[in-house]
Image (cartoon, rainbow, N blue to C red):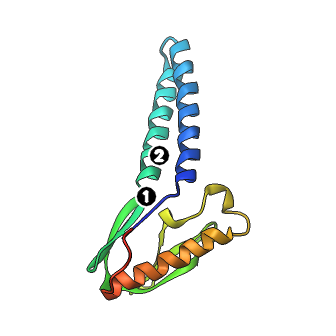
Amino acid sequence: MRIDQSTANKLSIGVFVAVAAYVLLILIRRLEGGPLNALMVATLVAILLYAYRVFRTAAIADDRQILVRNLLGNTMVSWGEVRSISAGPSPRGENIGVNLLLADGTVLPIEASWGPWYQGRGKPDSDHARACEEWVEQLRAVASGRPTSPD
């Protein structure tokens, strides 16, 4: 089973990255070296690395474990370490998505299940809330060894 960022969210981030990269490349070409040019190149690299991590966010589950690829790192957790799976606000409350409560009491959010970035501060979209509940049921089925529908 796999949870990925929505296509709309990836598209909006992709457009931002393309525009930012284009602007930075124009500025880099206009400047003839110097510390500001190096700063522009470093900013461009940072934007591209950020975009790469956003596009790679996912949760991939099988009957033994779940791999959660979040923006700042990957976490592999066996189902024995997961106390519960729920849909709701992220630990900081800025997004609605799927969260794993681990045996040690920490909450591991699945960032790939978060709605588009512009929904984070408002009411959750009912379609997104339904999708989160479906993901929770699918993850529970995978964790218990029950068959699920393909991705």
Which label sits on residue 50? 2
Asked if residue 99 shows in the view, the reply is no
Q: Where is the N terminus found, in terms of image quarters?
A: bottom left
Q: Residue furthest left?
A: 64
The residue that appears at 53% across and 57% down in the rendered structure is: 6
The numbered dot on residue 57 is 1
Q: Nearer the viewer, residue 43 or 5?
A: 5
Q: Secondary structure at mark 1?
A: loop
Res. 131 mark: none
Q: Quadrant of residue 87?
A: bottom right
Dot 1, how many residues are within 10 Å of its Cα: few (below 14), some (14-19), or many (20+)? many
Please name the residue shown 51% across and 15% down the image. Answer: 29
Q: In the figure, 40 relative to 59: above or below?
A: above
Task: Pinpoint residue 51: horizontal percent, then vertical percent.
Answer: 47, 45
Q: Position of residue 92 (x, y in %)?
A: 60, 70
Residue at position x 51%, y 66% from top?
Answer: 113
Residue 66 shown left or right of residue 96 in the figure: left
Question: Which residue type carries mark 1?
Answer: Thr
Task: Give 117 or 104, whichever is nearer the viewer.
Answer: 117
- Considering the image in quadrants, where does the C terminus appear? bottom left
Distance in Å between CA atoms under marks 2 and 1: 11 Å
Do labels 2 and 1 touch, CB within 8 Å? no
